[in-house]
């Protein structure tokens, strides 16, 4: 059995999840499609890489690049090593703040769907600033705090029941149950600016609506109609001198 995304998978189930990544079909998913063009090489660090989906896609698209994927969850890294390893990928279980890389080591750092999991984002951004080469870039994505999905979640269900359930939530799942912050593009840009990064561009991805309490569907056409209300915000920033 494999543990991924907060639950156990058989090998067959996991292979079904990974198959669209390996065949290239997954590249059409809007969060992936809107993120990949922002990434620069040839040395890339994928922080919070999970099972290595993005690392694999970048490595496959750019065989001459070197992609390093790190995550705190050993189960996820084991999946990446077994299922999504290429000659130009390297995966390891690693705490970036305890086992540091050498300064000026990377052209691009990815922090995808991860900043919402950390208590002190500024600490990570300062570390990224030191790890990036001069003029290197950071590509970051996170659930959009002002998305239609987040707004709808506050209706049609018991808020008090959800609040009471928080104390019993499982830990170390790598899922939304560990989100400790929410950001929109303005707050992200301000946070980046305070830590030595210059905003370059941003985009949005996915627009989910509920069919039931537990089932959501993505309305692709809404991604262009109501961008600021999409599920995810993606932002690219460039390393500059920190402001004094």
Image: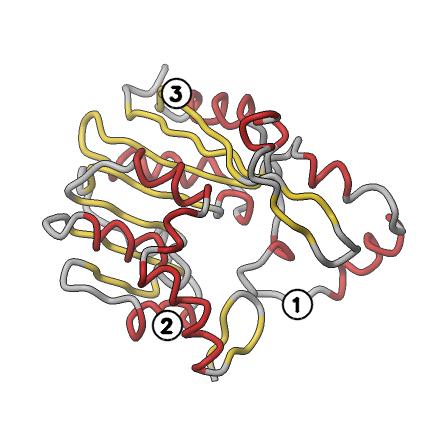
Q: Residues within 10 Å of mark 3 (few under 14, many from 20)?
A: some
Position of 62 relative to 165 (above/below): above
Q: CA distance from mark 1 to mark 3?
A: 35 Å
Residue 192, percent from left and from top: 43, 26
Q: Residues within 10 Å of mark 2 (few under 14, many from 20)?
A: some
**Numbered mark located on residue 170 in the image:** 1
Position of 152 relative to 81 (above/below): above
Residue 62, percent from left and from top: 17, 48
**Mark 3 or mark 2: whose residue is earlier in sequence:** 2
Residue at point 53% right, 60% down? 174
Q: Which residue is mark 3?
A: 199
Q: CA distance from mark 3 to mark 2?
A: 34 Å
Q: Nearer the viewer, residue 237 or 134?
A: 237
Q: Nearer the viewer, residue 43 or 208?
A: 208
Residue at point 32% right, 50% down? 46
Q: Residues within 10 Å of mark 1 (few under 14, many from 20)?
A: few
Front disc: 2 or 1: 2
- Helix, strand or loop at label 3? It is strand
Residue at point 36% right, 20% down? 200
Q: Residue at the top extreme?
A: 244
Q: Are marks 3 and 2 in contact (CB under 8 Å)?
A: no
């Amino acid at each position: 059995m494999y543990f991924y995304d907060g639950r156990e998978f058989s090998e067959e189930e996991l292979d079904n999840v990974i198959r669209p990544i390996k065949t290239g079909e997954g590249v059409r998913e809007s969060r992936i499609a809107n993120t990949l063009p922002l990434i620069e090489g040839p040395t890339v660090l994928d922080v919070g890489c999970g099972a290595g989906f993005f690392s694999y896609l970048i490595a496959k698209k750019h065989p001459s690049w070197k992609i390093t994927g790190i995550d705190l969850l050993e189960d996820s890294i084991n999946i990446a090593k077994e299922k999504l390893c290429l000659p130009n990928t390297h995966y390891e279980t690693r705490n970036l703040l305890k086992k540091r890389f050498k300064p000026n080591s990377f052209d691009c750092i990815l922090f995808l769907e991860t900043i919402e999991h950390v208590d002190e984002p500024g600490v990570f951004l300062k570390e990224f600033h030191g790890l990036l080469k001069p003029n290197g870039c950071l590509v970051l994505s996170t659930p959009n705090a002002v998305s239609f999905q987040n707004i709808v979640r506050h209706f049609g269900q018991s808020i008090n029941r959800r609040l009471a359930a928080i104390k019993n939530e499982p830990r170390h799942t790598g899922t939304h149950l560990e989100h400790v912050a929410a950001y929109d593009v303005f707050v992200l840009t301000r946070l980046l600016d305070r830590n030595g990064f210059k905003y370059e561009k941003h985009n949005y991805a996915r627009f989910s609506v509920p069919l039931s309490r537990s089932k959501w569907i993505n309305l692709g056409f809404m991604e262009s109609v109501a961008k600021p209300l999409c599920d995810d915000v993606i932002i690219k920033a460039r390393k500059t001198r920190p402001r004094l």
